[in-house]
């Protein structure tokens, strides 16, 4: 009788161990599946965020390009106004003509080029003339600092 009880307990222990092993394997499989799903969702969210950031960057670039184009048109318009209202002869007329020509040239440049081309041109000028570029940056900083203090 003791042996049959021992055998019963032994059988129950083996069944319990087998059941625990199966439960563990099922839990392990479920955990792997959940981890794979979470990883896939994270990749999808990152991809969506990257796409949205790219779209917003393109929109901002387009708006900046439109603003630069508008500034260029405004400069050209100001050049025309200056030519119409400034004296036609004398030193003041000559100076006004030169300023108008430069405004018109700058306005045309801004209207005809996009932000990438302007940035490349600026970096080329800075590489070619680093000391004057630094002097200009410090001068602009000094002027902005004085204007912001008031």
Image (cartoon, rainbow, N blue to C red):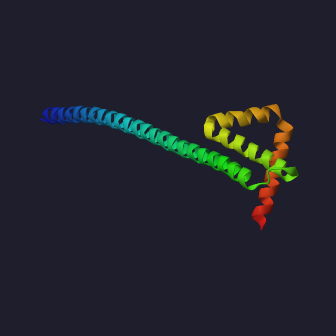
Q: Residue furthest front?
A: 89
Looking at the picture, tell me which residue is in the foreground, 20 or 149: 149
107 or 22: nearer the eye? 107
Residue at left offset 45%, top offset 38%: 51
Q: Nearer the viewer, residue 34 or 133?
A: 133
Image x and y of residue 90, in percent: 87, 51
Q: Vertical placement of 47 versus 81: above or below?
A: above
| Quarter that holds the C terminus | bottom right
Image quadrant of residue 49?
Answer: top left
Left or right position of 48 against 146 = left
Question: Is 118 rendered above or below residue 103?
Answer: above
Q: Residue at x 83, y 35 (%)?
A: 129
Residue at the spot 72% in from the left edge and 37% down from the top edge:
122
The number of numbered badges drawn on the structure is 0
Q: Position of residue 128 (x, y in %)?
A: 81, 31
Q: Is residue 92 left or right of residue 23?
A: right
Q: Where residue 74 sits in the image (x, y, percent)?
A: 64, 50
Where residue 11 appears, as percent x and y from the top left, is: 18, 32
The quadrant of the picture occupied by the N terminus is: top left
Horizontal relation, residue 75 to residue 143: left or right: left
Task: Name the residue located 22 percent from the left edge and 34 percent from the top edge.
Answer: 19
């Amino acid at each position: 009788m003791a042996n049959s009880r021992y055998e019963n307990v032994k059988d129950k222990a083996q069944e319990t161990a087998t059941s625990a092993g199966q439960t563990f394997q099922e839990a392990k499989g479920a955990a792997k599946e959940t981890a794979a799903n979470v990883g896939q969702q994270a990749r999808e969210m990152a991809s969506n965020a990257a796409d949205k950031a790219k779209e917003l960057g393109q929109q901002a670039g387009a708006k900046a390009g439109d603003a630069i184009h508008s500034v260029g048109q405004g400069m050209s318009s100001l050049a025309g106004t200056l030519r119409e209202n400034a004296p036609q002869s004398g030193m003041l007329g000559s100076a006004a003509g030169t300023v108008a020509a430069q405004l018109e040239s700058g306005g045309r440049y801004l209207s005809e080029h996009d932000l990438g081309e302007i940035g490349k041109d600026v970096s080329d000028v800075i590489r070619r003339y680093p000391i004057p570029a630094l002097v200009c940056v410090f001068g602009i900083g000094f002027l902005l600092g004085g204007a912001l203090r008031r």
